[in-house]
Image (tube, rainbow, N blue to C red):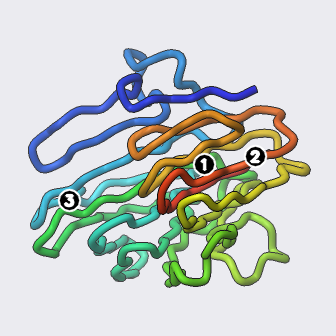
Amino acid sequence: MLQVRLANTLDGGDFGWLKARHHFRVTPEGNPANAPLGPLIVWNDDEIAPGTGFGLHGHANMEIVTYVREGAVTHRDSTGNVGITSAGDVQVMSAGTGIRHSEHNLGQEPLRLFQIWLRPSREGNKPRWNTRRFPKADRGNKFTLLASGFPEDSDALPIQADAHVLGATLLAGSEIKYTLGGFRYAYLAPARGTVRVNDQRIGVGDGIGASDEAHLRIKAEEDAEIVLVVAK
């Protein structure tokens, strides 16, 4: 089953320093059609103004993956980690037993990012954070594994969830296929460009969810950059 979530069906708002779209309902008042997909419960599309950001706040027992679309995010947390993640790259944070962190745009241009939350496969893990560069040239017309909850995927950032986070950059007219295999749920959103997923058209600001689909066929109508999460 496929569900297209067009930009005009998403919750969110313009708060001046923050422009937010919520692909998944995050409050009881949100769009009930945009429900979680298994352990995937949040996919926020945020634009953060220069010199602003999210101040120190806490999480527990949540896996948080940040994909930077434009600009760079500066991270600080209560375990002593400090780091910068730039456009096209990824940071992951396992909140585990509890962590406090801040995320700021210290640059001169707006920061645009996807922030993705997954329930962990096991609660009570030790908090941790990491970031890694993923050159877009390495993702040309193919998926690259960015984060994984499976120890055999040593080239990906580790998360504590039964999921894969993948990225691809597609040239106009190109087509790639993803076989879900043992994964039941999937969600895909373009960071740039317009694509067709199993013949459903989605562009920047939109997303598409899948449950119990065997394959996803993605065709780029124009040069595109996409992020895909699959989960059990």
Q: Earlier in the sequence, mark 1 or mark 3?
A: 3
Rendering coords of residue 173 (x, y %): 60, 58
Establish if 214 lies above or below 178: above
Q: Nearer the viewer, residue 56 or 207?
A: 207
The mark found on residue 53 in the picture is 3
Judged from this view, the residue extending furthest toward the front is 173
Dot 1, crowdedness within 10 Å: few (<14), some or many (≥20)? many
Residue 95 visible to the viewer: no
Q: Earlier in the sequence, mark 2 or mark 3?
A: 3
From the image, tell me which residue sits under label 1.
118
Q: CA distance from mark 2 to mark 1?
A: 21 Å
Looking at the rendered image, the disc whose residue lies closer to the viewer, 2 or 1, is: 2
Amino acid at dot 3: Gly
Which element is circle 1 on? strand
Q: Nearer the viewer, residue 53 or 228?
A: 228
Looking at the rendered image, the disc whose residue lies closer to the viewer, 2 or 3, is: 2
Which element is circle 2 on? strand
From the image, tell me which residue sits under label 2.
216
